[in-house]
Image (tube, rainbow, N blue to C red):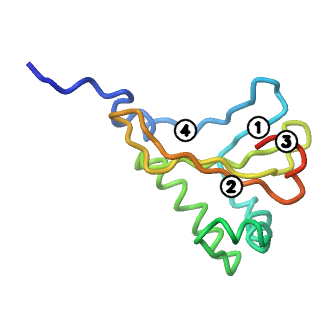
Amino acid sequence: MSLSPAPVIPAGTLSHSTQPTLVSPDGGLLSRPWAAADADVVYGAYRDAGIRRWTLRRMTSRGDVLQWIAAGQRQWRQERAAQWAVADAGSGDVLGRAALRRMDLAHGLAESAYGVLPHARVRGDA
């Protein structure tokens, strides 16, 4: 008899599936995996003093951004983290980022992180 509870999310559940695209309950926001096409948006975001203030990461080139996007895709497959671009569902404009870090699927735990781009901060979506 095992005293350990069954894992909340069994290992392999995420790595054997495509990272989902999520829609907010009101249909106004779309959270989707980051793509290479988002590199310029992310690079621009890291020029913002507000974002630089709250993160240790520095994106000094478009290449840094592409490496970050690729690392996020690997982390999903490794079931370690998940990152989403948060966009306006109507226009597709990227408004920010949502993430689950330090995921512990066995216990159903993760640390959440988010960021909002300067042009989207007045919308109240955070």
User: Tag 1 or tag 4, which sits nearer the N-term?
Assistant: 4
- Vertical side of 78 occupied by 5: above or below: above
Location of the N terminus by quadrant is: top left
Q: What's the CA distance linking mark 4 and mark 3?
A: 29 Å
Where is mark 2, residue-wise? Answer: 35
Q: Is residue 63 left or right of residue 101?
A: right
Where is mark 4, residue-wise? Answer: 18
Q: Which residue is nearer to you in this view: 68 or 6?
A: 6
Where is mark 3, residue-wise? Answer: 124
Q: Mark 4 and 3 residues: CB-CB less than 8 Å, in contact? A: no
Q: Which residue is nearer to you in this view: 53 or 15?
A: 53
Q: Residues within 10 Å of mark 3 (few under 14, many from 20)?
A: few
- Label 1 sits on a secondary structure element that is strand
Q: What's the CA distance linking mark 1 and mark 2?
A: 14 Å
Q: What's the CA distance linking mark 3 and mark 2?
A: 25 Å
Amino acid bearing label 4:
Thr
